[in-house]
């Protein structure tokens, strides 16, 4: 197989799709994706654009690739990613984003440009031009497209009398607030994406369409970056592979699985030792798999500041340092992790040890959790068994690693 397209829709919630929400009126998109497989239990590794995409392209969890949170500046050194691997294998490799700046300083950022260099507002760029560059008539290709129109604001900017959606949610009018978000998703699915998908020859292309994280619209989290919650970690993933494809049915799947799956489909020479599982060859031993999501806002929650966008590339010297100096800490920063098996959601705050267990189908009602030690053991096993600890040790600022280790030990994660 030699043609791959990955489409990511920013903030795409699990229920913002007709397959999971009958209210969603997207008949053209539904026809074009009718034969795509749908992952019912697909989870991202982080509730933020930068760490989540880095996992998608490296097959590694945030603690392994170095982008622990949205405000971390760069990846650990020497982490392999799909853009580079495909480029070295002779593919035509290109990415297009409605907000390419959000990938600044990441190793794969040089491969990702704007949707339309001539457009001031990227969602108003030329779809014709994009389609022509994204779907070249021949030759091996690895392409990526990132929609940002669905991100906070949801296309409401400059519209007079636009409502404050946070206030609506706080006042209990969640359905009313969701209408604006859903309209932005429907615009992307039923207009922009349809124009692209109808030009794709499905006998040649493997296509993956997914969210990079969801969006809260609930009392615990309004947007996405400041809390782990089922609404932000459980998102849609649709996939088409020529010759047929289905997701493993009985278990959770993760964004880290895409790397080994695509590497196998393209027969790429990779030395991959991460926790991701090739969807075409799920291991029987992992039917009760728990997949990890991580949140780290120790340095803040937003990346797109003028300082970050103006900073010359060479000044970033580690994931958390500019010219060797640690960047400013965020007083309200937290570290959380959660584990999901597709039915349950367990979340723990790494600093306080506070935790909740929930049934994914039953929303925000906490379940009684008799044994947090079970989930802590699963988490500890991932950290202890990671084949990428050497990479971390090499790249992490030594002080930071020591602080984290101390914290983990105090909470009983480390012996
Ligand atoms: Zn995002």
Image (spheres, rainbow, N blue to C red):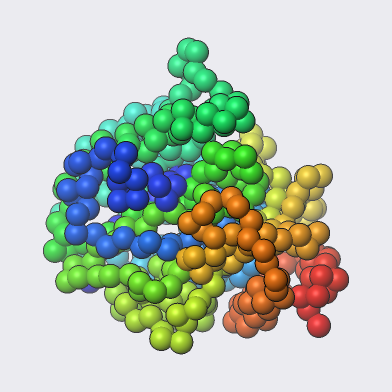
The residue located at (30%, 51%) in the rendering is 19
Residue 102 location in percent, x, y? Answer: 53, 44
The residue located at (18%, 49%) in the rendering is 32
Q: Is residue 330 visible?
A: yes
Q: Nearer the viewer, residue 45 or 252?
A: 252
Q: Nearer the viewer, residue 32 or 326?
A: 32
The residue located at (70%, 73%) in the rendering is 371
Q: Nearer the viewer, residue 141 or 367?
A: 367
Residue 198 location in percent, x, y? Answer: 16, 47
Q: Is residue 127 visible?
A: no
Q: Taking 281 as reference, is 318 left or right?
A: right
The residue sitting at the top extreme is 160
**Quadrant of the rendering where the N terminus is positioned:** bottom left
Q: Is residue 11 above or below residue 238?
A: above
Q: Taking 157 as reference, is 352 left or right?
A: right
**Quadrant of the rendering where the C terminus is positioned:** bottom right
The residue sitting at the front extreme is 368
Residue 365 location in percent, x, y? Answer: 60, 52
Residue 219 location in percent, x, y? Answer: 62, 39
- Quarter where residue 409 is shown: bottom right
The residue located at (44%, 47%) in the rendering is 13
Q: Is residue 250 above or below residue 221?
A: below
- Quarter where residue 196 is shown: top left
Q: Nearer the viewer, residue 162 or 270?
A: 162
Count the marks.
0
């Amino acid at each position: 197989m030699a043609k791959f397209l990955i489409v990511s829709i920013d903030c795409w919630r699990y229920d913002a799709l007709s397959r999971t929400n009958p209210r969603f009126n997207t008949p053209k998109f539904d026809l074009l994706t009718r034969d795509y497989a749908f992952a019912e239990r697909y989870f991202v590794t982080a509730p933020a654009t930068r760490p989540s995409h880095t996992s998608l392209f490296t097959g590694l969890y945030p603690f392994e690739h170095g982008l622990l949170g949205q405000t971390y500046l760069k990846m650990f050194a020497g982490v392999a990613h799909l853009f580079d691997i495909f480029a070295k294998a002779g593919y035509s490799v290109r990415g297009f984003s409605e907000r390419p700046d959000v990938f600044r300083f990441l190793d794969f950022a040089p491969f990702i440009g704007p949707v339309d260099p001539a457009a001031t507002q990227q969602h108003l760029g030329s779809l014709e031009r994009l389609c022509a560059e994204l779907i070249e008539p021949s030759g091996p290709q690895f392409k990526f497209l990132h929609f940002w129109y669905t991100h906070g604001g949801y296309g409401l900017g400059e519209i007079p009398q636009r409502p404050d959606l946070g206030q609506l949610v706080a006042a209990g009018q969640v359905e009313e607030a969701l209408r604006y978000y859903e309209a932005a998703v429907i615009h992307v699915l039923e207009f922009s994406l349809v124009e692209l998908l109808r030009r794709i020859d499905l006998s040649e292309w493997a296509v993956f369409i997914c969210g990079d994280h969801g969006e809260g619209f609930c009392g615990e989290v309004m947007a996405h970056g400041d809390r782990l919650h089922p609404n932000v970690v459980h998102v849609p993933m649709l996939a088409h592979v020529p010759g047929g494809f289905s997701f493993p049915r009985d278990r959770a799947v993760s964004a880290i699985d895409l790397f080994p799956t695509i590497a196998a489909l393209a027969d790429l020479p990779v030395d991959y030792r991460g926790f991701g599982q090739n969807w075409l060859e799920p291991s029987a031993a992992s039917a009760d798999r728990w997949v990890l999501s991580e949140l780290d806002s120790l340095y803040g929650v937003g990346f797109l500041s003028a300082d970050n966008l103006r900073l010359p590339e060479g000044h970033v010297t580690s994931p958390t340092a500019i010219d060797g100096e640690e960047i400013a800490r965020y007083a309200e920063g937290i570290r959380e992790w959660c584990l999901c098996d597709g039915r349950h959601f367990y979340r723990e705050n790494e600093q306080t040890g506070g935790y909740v267990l929930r049934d994914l189908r039953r929303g925000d009602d906490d379940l009684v959790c008799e044994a947090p030690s079970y989930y802590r053991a699963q988490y500890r096993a991932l950290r202890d068994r990671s084949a990428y600890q050497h990479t971390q040790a090499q790249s992490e600022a030594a002080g930071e690693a020591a602080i984290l280790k101390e914290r983990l030990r105090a909470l009983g994660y480390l012996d």
